[in-house]
Amino acid sequence: MRTRLLAALCFLLPSVALAGDARCKGTPKARAARFSDKALKGRSPAERYAEYVKACALDEVVDLTKSLVRFKTVSSEQPAAKSPEVAAMGRFLEKWAREHGLGFRSVGGNDVFELSWGEGAPRLGLVFHGDVVPAPAHEWKKPPFEPYVEKGRLYGRGVEDDKGPLASTLVAISLAKELGLSPRQGKVLVIIGNGEESDWSGMQKYAETQTPHPTHVISVDSNFPVVAAQGGFVAWQLEADLGTAPAQPTAGRMRAVDVTAGEFLTQVPGAAVLKLEPAGLAPDKALAAVKDAVAEVRKARPSLQAEVKQEGAQVVLTTHGKAVHASVAEEGHNAMWDLAAVAAKLPLESNGIEALLGVVASRFDGDNWGEKLGVAYQDALMGRLLVAPTVLRVKDGKVSLGVNMRRPQGRDNAAFNASLDEAAALLSRDSGGRVREPKAVKGGEGSRYVGDPHVADTSGPLVTTLLDIYKRHRGEPEAKPTSVRGGTYARLFPRAVDFGPAFPGDLYTGHAPDESISLDNLDAATRMVAEALHTLALTPPAKK
C-alpha cells in the first residue's frame, strides 16, 4: 500500500520547468541511469518511473507531436490505402518502433497501424487515430501542418485530436523501457486507425478480426475524467432541386444563385456565403436591400457578424460564426443560422436555395436540441439529443443540407427513425414539397445513417482504476464517469472507455481552426496515461 501511495504521489507532483531539469540531459541511457534503482535508492520501480515521466517526458512529447502533425493525413481527401501521407507516417512510426524496441505492423492497406510491446495475449490496448479533419489554410493564423509553440500552447492540426495524445503514450512507453520496465501480464498494443474522421470500415474490420481483444482498452481521444458512454452518430441529409430561373425576372425580387456553409459534417460552420443576382431589382436597390436585411436582423442579434459587398453583377452576403466540433455545437455559433435569418428578410425568387434556407431559419436557427424539428429527447446519463446543420452546398442542380446529430440512449432505432421520418415530412410541408430527404439509391445506404449509443461498464476495474488516477492527479475526489456526444474508436471494443485528453471546462479545439493544446494539459495527460500504463500492464499479477 505504501509503495502504491508513494508512486501515486510522484505522478501527482506538479510539473517543473522540464528543459531546466539537468537529469534529462544526455543520451537516453545516461538519463535513465539518473532514475535507476542505484541512483534513487529505496524507491520502487513505480516511483522512479513516475519521477522520470514528470521530469523528462514533455519535451519529447512536444517534439514527437510536431513530427506527426507534419504528415497531412486528411482522410476525407484520400483514404488511408491511397494516401502517400498516411504511408509516410506509417514508415515514420515503423522506424520509431524499431528504434525503441517495439513491434510494428500495418493492417488492411494502412487502415490500421499497430505497435506492440511484450509477449503473450494482449493485456492493454491504447487506441488512437492518425488521420485528421481538413484544415482550410485561410481559416488559420499560421499554416496548420507546421506546428509551433506559442504562449504555452502547441498549435497545429491534430495536436489535440489525436496526434498529441498518441505522442504522449509512445513517449510514456519509451521511458518505461529505458528504465527496464516491461509488461508483466501480457503485451501492450498501441492501435492507430487512419479513418476515424471519415470511414471507419478499416478499424471496424480490425476490431472484428484481430482477436482476442486486450483485457483493457483505452481510447485517448475524448475527455477526462473517464468517458464511459458515447452518443450515437447520426448523419442526415436534406435536399431541394435548384430549379431553373424564370424566363423573365420576377419584379421586385432577387435570385439566390449559390450558397456555401461549412467544411465538413462534424464541424459547426464558422462562415457561410450567399451569392445573389439582382434579377428583378436594380443593382443598387439589391445591394441596399441586403444591407437593410442585415441591419434588421442585427437589432435582434447585436453580435451578428455579416459582410455585404458587390462582386461584378452579384451581391455577396457572408456571415461569420464560431466553428467548433459538432458534438459541442452549443459552445460555438453556427454561421448558417445567421445567413438563413438574413435571407428570410430578403425578397427572393422561389428556388431550392431559398427553400432550404427557409427551413434552416424556421426549424434549426437558434436550436441545438431539435425542439423546432420535433425530435428532441434526453437521457439522465447522456443528456440531450444534439442537432447541428453543418454543410450547405449547391451541386449538379441540387441544393443539399447535411445535418449531424448526436443521439443519447432512450429511444430505440425504430422510434428514432420514425421521428426523423416525421421531421422530414414536416419540412416537406413547410416548403411546399420542395425540401425532401433523398431516397436511397438502389443498392446504396441512402441519405441517413443512425449509429447506436455506446455504454461501457462503469463498475469494472478499468473505470475504477482510471477514475482513481484522475481524482488524485486533479484533486477532484467527487469525479464521476461521464458521457460525450462524440464517437471514438472505443465504441468498437467491448467495455472500452476514453481517458482524455481534454479536461473539464476547457474548450475543445480538435476540429476548429488554430487547433491547440496547452503544454500543461499535455504534460498532465502524459503523466496520467503513464500511470495507467504502469498500473494496468507493468505490474505483476496480484497474488491469489
Image: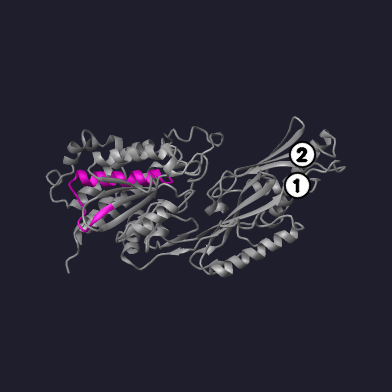
Instruction: Return the x and y of residue 496 as percentages of the image width and height.
Output: 37, 60
Numbered badge on residue 291: 2
Q: Quadrant of residue 185?
A: bottom left
Image-based side of 308 in relation to 200, left or right: right
Q: For marks 1 and 2, give the CA distance.
A: 26 Å
Task: Report the quarter where the N terminus lies.
Answer: bottom left
Does residue 17 appear in this view? no
Q: Residue furthest front?
A: 442
In the foreground, 508 or 493: 493
What residue does disc 1 label?
243
Span shown in magenta: 159-188
Q: Quadrant of residue 33?
A: top left
Does residue 89 appear in this view? yes
User: Which one is earlier in the sequence, the residue at label 1 or at label 2?
Assistant: 1
Q: How many marks?
A: 2
Image-based side of 347 in relation to 518, left or right: right
Disc 1 marks a residue whose amino acid type is: Gly
Instruction: Return the x and y of residue 203 as percentages of the image width and height.
Output: 40, 53
In the foreground, 476 or 185: 185
Q: Is residue 216 above or below residue 380?
A: above
Q: Residues within 10 Å of mark 2 (few under 14, many from 20)?
A: some
Helix, strand or loop status at disc 1: loop
Instruction: Return the x and y of residue 273 as percentages of the image width and height.
Output: 67, 40
Disc 2 marks a residue whose amino acid type is: Lys
In the foreground, 51 or 350: 350
Residue at image coords 19%, 41%: 32
Q: Residues within 10 Å of mark 1 (few under 14, many from 20)?
A: few
Q: Nearer the viewer, mark 1 or mark 2?
A: 1
Instruction: Return the x and y of residue 308 as percentages of the image width and height.
Output: 72, 36
- Residues at circles 1 and 2 in contact by the CB criterion of under 8 Å: no
